[in-house]
Image (cartoon, rainbow, N blue to C red):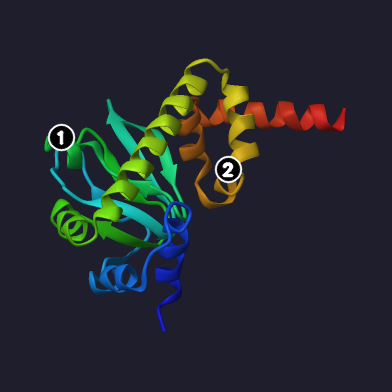
Amino acid sequence: MKPPLESQLFDYIAQYITLTEEERNAIHALNLFRRYPKNTLLLKQGERSNKSYFVLKGCLRCFYLLEGEEKTTEFYTESQSLSPVCAVNNEPSEYYIECVEECILSIGTPDIEKGAFEQFPRLKTLCLSISEEKLADNQASYSRFKNSTAEQRYLHLVEHRAELMNRVPQHQIASYLGVQPESLSRIRKRLAGKKTA
């Protein structure tokens, strides 16, 4: 019987293609799954890495360190994938990747992907489809962020990713929204006042 976490990965892939039993067994044989404790830094600024991640359990955070201050750019939770820019351009990373919670991740590398693509060409098509979808989502997210107020960004986060509020420290949420923690507190109080009014 396949482990439940593997089934989660297969369920994600099933949104795009139906895997054959041979393809499932090949993915199973790759032994891609790794567990990381909370606060593990998977990648540091200045490091090189060719690893990509798929979150089976837990939460990852990307952040920059600018003048000693952390600037959070994204959170990745269950069934989301992350390919650091340095894994594509072979340059030192400009940012950090941290496990906000204990994480179970599926790890990919170019060598693993090359072997899988050669054996199963359909998987290459799958990865291209997912990459194109992610690129479109990232562009939409960036445009929305640039053209909205801090309060609008907070409301969007609550509407679309409410679970982060209970999983991520508030100072990281504030950093992600581009405000100081005190400003986030004021936004929340103001919105709470509107609800009771």
Quick one: 121 or 52, which is closer to the camera? Answer: 121
Which residue, given by chain and number where applicable, does mark 2 sit on?
A: 161
Q: Residue at x 38, y 44 (%)?
A: 61
Quarter of the figure with the C terminus: top right
Quick one: 178 or 4, which is closer to the camera? Answer: 4
Give the residue type that dot 2 points to.
Answer: Arg
> Is 151 situated left or right of 74 in this image?
right
Q: Which residue lies furthest to the right in this view?
A: 197
Q: Which residue is drawn at 21% across and 43% down?
A: 44
Q: Residue at x 55, y 46 (%)?
A: 164
Q: Residue furthest top?
A: 147
> Is 156 situated left or right of 178 in this image?
right
Q: Characterize the local packing of mark 2: few (<14), some (14-19) or many (20 or more) Cα atoms within 10 angstroms.
A: few
Q: Position of residue 12 (x, y in %)?
A: 45, 57
Give the residue type that dot 1 points to.
Answer: Asn
User: What is the secondary structure assignment of the residue under circle 1?
Assistant: helix
User: What is the secondary structure assignment of the residue under circle 2?
Assistant: loop
Q: Where is residue 81 in the image (x, y as percent from the top left)?
A: 37, 49
1 and 2 marks in contact (CB < 8 Å): no
Quarter of the figure with residue 154:
top right
Q: In whole angstroms, how far apart are the C-alphas of marks 1 and 2?
A: 30 Å
> Is 49 situated left or right of 174 in this image?
left
Q: If you read the primary sequence from the N terminus, does the residue marked by circle 1 or circle 2 appear first? A: 1
Which residue, given by chain and number where applicable, does mark 1 sit on?
A: 89
Above or below residue 116? Residue 44 is above
Above or below residue 107? Residue 46 is above
**Which disc, if any, is residue 59?**
none
Above or below residue 3? Residue 122 is above
- Asked whether residue 41 is in view, the answer is no
